[in-house]
Image (tube, coloured by chain):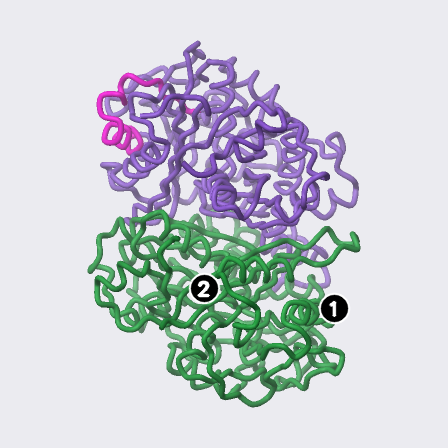
């Protein structure tokens, strides 16, 4: 086995709580952070609920200049990165900066800043063309969101390989997997990696309205996100970030760090079928899961928990359930599966990283977070989804998955570094 | 030792040519393709030149239903991908779908499409926003559409690192091949010649305001005063050597031999920019001594500070006048995520012909100690080429390509 990569620090900024501790409080309690949208007047929209983060950048160490310069999602990323680095206890300043890299995922980049800039520079749409004299100075860094990686790199002092990974709704898994690749191949020794998104904007809302992907359950915002439930009506937008410090196992041990988990396996596949539609059998997601397990040298029977994509659309939850049955066989029914999107919504690209954080915390606490709002069984979704209440459960190996527009299917296996392997 | 990664097919959509033949015919002689902006009314902006692809009719190349669902950048990407598979002598159906993947670099996504939907949103209201907006703008659109159209069900990827992302995507493709995929379609595309894109380029502050197409984008020239945006990109078919040989691939273009990437230090730190270290990492990865490099395809920012940084990095690695340097993107303008893959196409064609394409229009500033192939092409045996790309924010990427024996 070559270089093994472990998580040694975590930072989370999610709806219902800023920081790992508040995040885990929410997930383990089964409370939900979905509510009526307050970021702007959502009354003209079909779907008017979201899981919003109550985030005041001034309270999290960002300067006025940084707040002006950075998109909301970039701010999330920097705050979560700082928490992760502090949590890891690593002294990055003492390392060769060229050996520390950054990989940040995002689904929709700086969409809120672009939307704002467009409004400002067209007099709220009254001008047909964008007036560059009224556009913000940082418009290019919102237009091409490479800035999400550079801001994190500048915040932590990294000068190694840096990139933004943007594979839509699997970005948060794929970004971390990219960081793992860079450490394994020797291009970096430490990676600061994760994903961030702040998609609760009029444009995002409008385009998901148009295809009825987001929920119409406006009357009961706290119970609007209903993954795997027979009454589910689509996903609820969320926002937030999760960032990790990744290191090679032996060097983490040498400096006395206690790893949270090893990132033991990963694979991505394309369903290559349709930009928004999925083949019902879940074959490509199943293949990604199988390959990720193989890479981790684990069998389906070794999994203690499946952290589901569980977006709460009719199509996804059935597709995903089919994929688990294909990939895990009888263990699909014997392994707890849950969707934290029931509580924190779907923040598009970043949610994959937030779900990695949830998976790792489940391992740390031996507690599987629940699927909130799951009250009515759907015959197509017949696995053990840990409804409503968190469950104490020995958790040493977790599968987390993502699935998104464009056909992206990703699977990642997290495990204790000292596990026995198949 | 890992198996070698080969470039077995290329497809290009550039202002200087749609398709490899036209592109190379223009590039090898440095034929200028920069001209007045026609894709939108640029008369009210201080910069009015671009490298546009003229005469591209998506309906001639793509199914009719796909055209209204896609931004121009995706249409260009799909057409270039078709060309690349054809060039590789391969129908995607020849291999198992799960053995083939796709990795692309993105810049601004389907930005012209996005701007139109923003206009509808704010001038007409949310109910007028297109259902296609949900997948036509986001950065992953080209990878997704290429996978769907060609039934590529293997690993996927999308990277954003401004100009440098185009090389990062090829490197990620090589990683996927080393993990067991048979073929990865990899490249990058950008098309942001719309009013929102223009405002973004202007905000960044380095856009040339010259009115003269031949004088607007002059990297390494004492008169360098900014860049001109271009549109398009390239798609490269990468295969592992064993598989390529087994299927009887026609003679491959080159080996993708080395890669390195760094990020510049935080602005104002006073520390050395990261380009030199990226070059050294790529050379080390390729197991290649600087003296073996026959040509450097430069990033060529066209901004004096960045030109100086690049010239200094090249001189530091290769010595004064130590290696021929060229920037054929002077014919097309800077194509964002598409620029570096287009340079990779130029590099492999340069190897094939034994000719280094020129840095058109440029007269080398005496301030730089580099051997710039300016104005005219140069006949040379090109066995090893280094391609550089730098992105806004400080991204540095370098790729080494090596001729096959």
Badge 2 local density, few (<14 within 10 Å), some, or many (20+)? many
Q: Residue at x 55, y 41 (%)?
A: A199
Residue B305: which numbered mark, if any?
A: 1
The foreground one among B294 and A350 is B294
User: Which segment did they paint magenta?
Assistant: A318-339
Magenta segment's dominant SS is helix
The foreground one among A386 and A324 is A324
In the rendered image of this protein, does residue A15 appear above or below residue B272? above
Residue A221: which numbered mark, if any?
A: none
Q: Tell if the residue under mark 1 belongs to the same chain as the one under mark 2.
A: yes
Q: Estimate the x, y position of residue A266 in percent, counting from the top left.
A: 39, 37
Residue B312 falls in which quadrant of the image?
bottom right
Residue B73: which numbered mark, if any?
A: 2
Q: Secondary structure at mark 1?
A: helix
Of label 1 and label 2, which has the lower sequence position?
2
What separation in Å lies between label 1 and label 2 (alpha carbons)? Answer: 30 Å
Colour applied to chain B = green
Residue A189 falls in which quadrant of the image?
top right
Q: Estimate the x, y position of residue A137 in percent, counting from the top left.
A: 72, 57
Quadrant housing the C terminus of chain B: bottom left
Q: Residue at x 56, y 39 (%)?
A: A193
In the rendered image, what is the letter of the chain coloured purple? A
Residue A398 in view in this figure: yes
């Amino acid at each position: 086995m070559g270089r093994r990569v472990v998580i040694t620090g975590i930072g989370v900024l999610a709806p219902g709580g800023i920081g790992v501790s508040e995040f885990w409080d929410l997930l383990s309690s089964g409370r939900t952070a979905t509510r009526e949208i307050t970021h702007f007047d959502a009354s003209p929209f079909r779907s008017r609920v979201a899981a919003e983060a109550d985030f005041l950048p001034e309270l999290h160490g960002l300067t006025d200049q940084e707040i002006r310069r950075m998109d909301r999602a970039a701010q999330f990323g920097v705050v979560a990165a700082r928490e992760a680095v502090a949590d890891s206890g690593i002294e990055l300043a003492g390392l060769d900066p060229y050996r520390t890299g950054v990989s940040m995922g995002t689904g929709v980049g700086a969409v809120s800043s672009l939307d704002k800039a467009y409004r400002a520079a067209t007099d709220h749409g009254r001008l047909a063309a964008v007036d560059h004299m009224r556009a913000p100075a940082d418009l290019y860094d919102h237009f091409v969101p490479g800035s999400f990686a550079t801001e994190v790199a500048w915040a932590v002092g990294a000068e190694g390989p840096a990139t933004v990974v943007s594979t839509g709704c699997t970005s948060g898994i794929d970004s971390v997997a990219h960081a793992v690749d860079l450490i394994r191949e020797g291009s970096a020794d430490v990676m600061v990696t994760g994903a961030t998104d702040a998609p609760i904007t009029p444009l995002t809302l409008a385009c998901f309205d148009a295809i009825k992907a987001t929920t119409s359950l406006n009357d009961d915002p706290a119970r609007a996100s209903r993954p795997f439930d027979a009454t589910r009506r689509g996903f609820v937008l969320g926002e937030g970030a999760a960032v990790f410090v990744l290191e090679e196992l032996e060097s983490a041990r040498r400096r006395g760090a206690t790893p949270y988990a090893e990132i033991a396996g990963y694979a991505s596949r394309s369903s290559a079928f349709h930009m928004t539609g999925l083949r019902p059998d879940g074959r490509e997601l199943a293949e990604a899961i199988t390959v990720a397990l193989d890479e981790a040298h684990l069998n389906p029977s070794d999994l203690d928990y499946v952290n589901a994509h569980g977006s709460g659309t009719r199509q996804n939850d059935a597709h995903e359930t089919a994929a688990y049955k294909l990939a895990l066989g009888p263990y699909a029914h014997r392994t707890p599966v849950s969707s934290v999107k029931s509580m924190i919504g779907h923040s598009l690209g970043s949610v994959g990283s937030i779900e990695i954080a949830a998976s790792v915390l489940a391992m740390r606490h031996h507690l599987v977070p629940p699927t909130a709002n799951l009250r009515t069984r759907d015959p197509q979704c017949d696995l053990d989804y840990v409804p409503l209440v968190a469950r104490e459960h020995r958790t040493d190996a977790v599968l987390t998955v993502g699935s998104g527009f464009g056909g992206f299917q990703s699977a990642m296996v997290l495990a204790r570094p000292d596990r026995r392997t198949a | 030792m890992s198996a070698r990664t080969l470039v077995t097919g290329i497809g290009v959509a550039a202002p200087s040519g749609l398709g490899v033949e036209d592109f190379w015919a223009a590039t090898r002689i440095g034929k200028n393709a920069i001209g007045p902006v026609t894709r939108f009314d640029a008369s009210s902006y201080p910069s009015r030149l671009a490298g546009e692809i003229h005469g591209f009719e998506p309906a001639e190349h793509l199914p009719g239903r796909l055209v209204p669902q896609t931004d121009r950048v995706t249409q260009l990407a799909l057409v270039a991908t078709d060309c690349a598979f054809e060039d590789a002598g391969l129908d995607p159906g020849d291999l198992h779908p799960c053995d083939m993947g796709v990795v692309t670099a993105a810049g601004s996504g389907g930005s012209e499409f996005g701007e139109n939907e923003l206009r509808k949103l704010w001038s007409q209201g949310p109910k007028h926003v297109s259902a296609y907006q949900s997948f036509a703008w986001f950065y992953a659109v080209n990878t997704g559409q290429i996978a769907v159209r060609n039934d590529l069900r293997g690993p996927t990827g999308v990277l954003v690192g401004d100009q440098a992302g185009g090389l990062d995507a090829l490197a990620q493709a090589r990683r996927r091949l080393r993990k067991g995929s048979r073929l990865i379609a990899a490249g990058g595309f950008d098309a942001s010649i719309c009013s929102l894109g223009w405002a973004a380029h202007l905000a960044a502050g380095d856009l040339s305001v010259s009115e003269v197409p031949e004088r607007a984008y002059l990297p390494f020239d004492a008169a360098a005063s900014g860049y001109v945006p271009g549109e398009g990109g390239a798609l490269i078919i990468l295969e592992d050597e064993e598989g390529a040989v087994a299927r009887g691939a026609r003679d491959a273009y080159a080996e993708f031999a080395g890669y390195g990437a760094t990020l510049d230090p935080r602005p104002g730190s006073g520390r050395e920019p990261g380009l030199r270290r990226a070059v050294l990492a790529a050379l080390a990865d390729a197991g290649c001594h600087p003296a073996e490099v026959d040509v450097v395809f430069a990033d060529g920012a066209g901004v004096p500070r960045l030109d100086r940084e690049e010239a200094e990095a090249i001189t530091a690695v290769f010595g004064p006048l130590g290696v021929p340097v060229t920037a054929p993107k002077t014919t097309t303008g800077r194509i964002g995520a598409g620029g570096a893959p287009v340079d990779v196409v130029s590099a492999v064609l340069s190897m094939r012909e034994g000719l280094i394409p020129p840095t058109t229009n440029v007269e080398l500033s005496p301030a730089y100690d580099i051997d710039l192939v300016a104005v005219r092409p140069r006949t040379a045996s090109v066995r090893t080429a280094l391609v550089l790309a730098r992105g806004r924010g400080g991204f540095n990427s370098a790729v080494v390509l090596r001729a096959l024996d």
